[in-house]
Amino acid sequence: MAKEPMTEKVKRLIIEQDKIRNMSIIAHIDHGKTTLSDSLLAGAGMLSYETAGDQRYLDFLEEEQKRGITIQASNVNMVHEYEGKEFLINLIDTPGHVDFGGDVTRAIRAVDGAMVVVCAVEGAMPQTETVLRQALREKVKPVLFINKVDRLINELKLTPNKIQERFIGTIDDVNQIIVTFAPKEFIKEWQMRVEEGNVCFGSSVDKWALSFPIMKKKGLTFKDIYDAYAIEGTDREVALKKLRDKAPLHEGVLDMVASHLPTPKQAQKYRIPKIWKGDLTSPEGKSLINCDPNGPMVFCVTKVMVDPLAGEIAVGRLFSGTAKRGEDAHLSLSQMSSRVQQIYIFKGPQKFPVDLVPSGNIIGIGGLKGAFSGETISSQKDIVPFEEITHIFDPVVTKAIEAKNPKDLPKLIQVLRNITKEDPTLKAKINLETGEHLLSGLGELHLEIIENRITRDMKLEIVTSPPIVVYRESVIGSSPEMEGKSPNKHNKFYISVSSLSEAVNKAIVEGEIPKGRIKKKNLELIHKFIDLGMDKKEARRVIDVFEDNILLDMTAGIVHIGEVLDMTSNSFRAIVKEGPIAREPLSKVRIMLHDAKLHEDSIHRGPAQVIPAVREAIRGAMNAAGPKILEPIQTIRIDAPSQFMGVVSKLVQGRRGQLVDVTQEREHLIIIGKLPVAESFGFTSDLRSATEGRGVWSLMESEFVPIPKELEQDVIKRIRSRKGLKEGQ
């Protein structure tokens, strides 16, 4: 009997929701995600076992192959047999480098489970915490794979008892992250326990894996692993092949996925209330909760691919209904209508068209021009969109980018539109004063990769400036009510400004308080504000949350106020984007509208009158509240041999940094430090030079803090000069 092709198996299983597992592989950089993906694909019969690990099948971009790192998330469908049943695994391999963390954030929206990969030698690293925290924030259930066990035996020469101590330490570290960040109702259930089978350990290079169920089923112990590596020479390869045949990596890992990760229907019951704030008792709400293939089609875009032949392809998760070719579709946030021209399933760089796909699957849809990451697409008009997909870190590095040849300017604009659609953590804007195109990213490497893509893949010669730091504007105190008059002098607005409390700011940044305009009374949100220490009256008056700033309407008894609140909110958002000191974005600011005097005739209180008046009042209030420039500071972890303690400390402190903590484990040094982004350019190469190539650093946290007073005026002057701002602008 002819073997059924993998694509046909996938097409057959996409309609069986209880057989579907949507998962991503998440980890710190170089902990072995892509090698693991290769081995899983080989086990599913999609790659040769001999080339798996070296092929890096899901790192198909030229830049990924050249640099040996994953840059973008890649989708693949595979089929795995467990306990006599076939399961469809919709897998997304994600980047480990912090500069490409936006791809991890978006991939997590599409999945229900996450395979956390941790290196047995390095343990849980900063990016392990970051990506696991992102998964837990979206109620994505984790399982754990401890990789590179071979290194504990070959390199560190640890005894079996010491190796097991390492495992226990790693599991405890991961469980501590779960205790800290998991939803309260899942803290206990989602903990990693070897005896429950949600922990697997192995070697993706040598392609074996063990879990508690596999050890019982195959009669293996850890001593068998240790003995296989203890053999010298060519006999070791024979022993490892026997081990691989008895406990193949794909079997241990994918058995764990099939048995411990939820079906789409199970996951959506608790995930939908977290990521969708519509009415759960409405027909579309019930359909989303139940992952109903017969309900309205509701699709969340997590990625946009620009294909030279197929055009724009929106990739994401189908949460409700069935996607069909030729069906009308409505883009919720863009307020546009379109049509589903093509539906795709993925195998890494390849895509295969299908006629229809029911809910619970990760797919690509062609023809939805105007779609972007985070967009909600539905067969129904006016559906409530999904919660915004927000990354933990903001873009903090900017470069001015210009076409080398002026005639290529239209092409540059189109290229920037395409790349910001594909990667929403990139921000592009035109500086109208200077005519520059400004591109902001998560780090130096992020922007460097994009520049290379523009030059090589898009055949566009460009000129870029040295890196520019993105600062923030805020206030240190409170202002009295300040008056803003409309140009016709018929309307007046009275506004005060104060700094936002740390508790509210943290809740916005971490996604506990959703961003956006608040059109109607939301009791749940009001109680959240009150719990965070906000006055009850003020909590009821919040009308807009934009970035990490809020706008409150404290007015009472004003007849026409409802007609101007949207314009007030537009003015608030404009000021948040470009503050009064140096046109940098606002952060941690609370703006309160106390009173307004409005002209009786609506023709005299239009946008041209209201917006300048509100803007004038906000700017005046900010200047009265003590304006302050905030600079981005990164908390970093540096790993290096202990003999380099002195040079590493000097390197950090010489860049206006400070040491927070220093620990030493035998010959290994771990330094936690704080480093201003403005001083971090070139830090990677300087660290390598200072430590003879043996020092590495990783990002733990990023925050904005007031810039030292002695530097503030010089920084403001440089920003204003770069933007071409004159006195009074």
Image (cartoon, grey):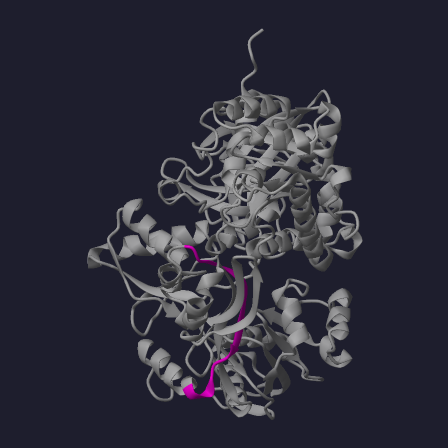
Q: Quadrant of the N terminus?
A: top right
Q: Residue furthest top?
A: 1
Q: Is residue 73 left or right of residue 561?
A: left
Whether residue 14 is situated above or below residue 537 in the rendered picture: above
In this orientation, which residue lies closer to the viewer: 602 or 295? 295
Which residue lies at the image location 41% right of the left edge and 84% below the top edge?
A: 711
User: Quick check: 632 left or right of 390?
Assistant: left
In the image, residue 645 lies at what x, y percent? Answer: 47, 66
Which quadrant of the structure image shows residue 129? bottom right
Q: Quadrant of residue 228?
A: top right
**Res 328 seen here:** yes
Please say if 242 is above or below 132. above
Above or below for 442 versus 65: below
Residue 312 sits in quarter: top left
> In the rendered view of the protein, which quadrant contains the C terminus?
bottom left
Give the number of callouts. Answer: 0
| Main secondary structure type of the part rendered in magenta | strand
Which residue corresponds to the image point at 66% horizontal and 45% vertical from the top-left? 162
Task: Looking at the picture, tell me which residue is in the foreground, 586 or 74.
Answer: 74
Q: Is residue 542 left or right of residue 306?
A: right
Pick the residue in front: 617 or 710.
Answer: 710
- Asked if residue 570 is positioned above or below residue 128 in the image, the reply reads below
User: Residue 643: image x %, image y %?
Assistant: 46, 62
Question: x and y percent of residue 512 in the render?
Answer: 68, 63
Is 295 colored magenta in this rendering? no
Q: In front here: 273 or 335?
A: 273
Q: Would residue 487 be visible to someone looking at this image?
A: no
Q: Which residues are magenta?
A: 694-710
Residue 148, position in %: x, y? Answer: 56, 40
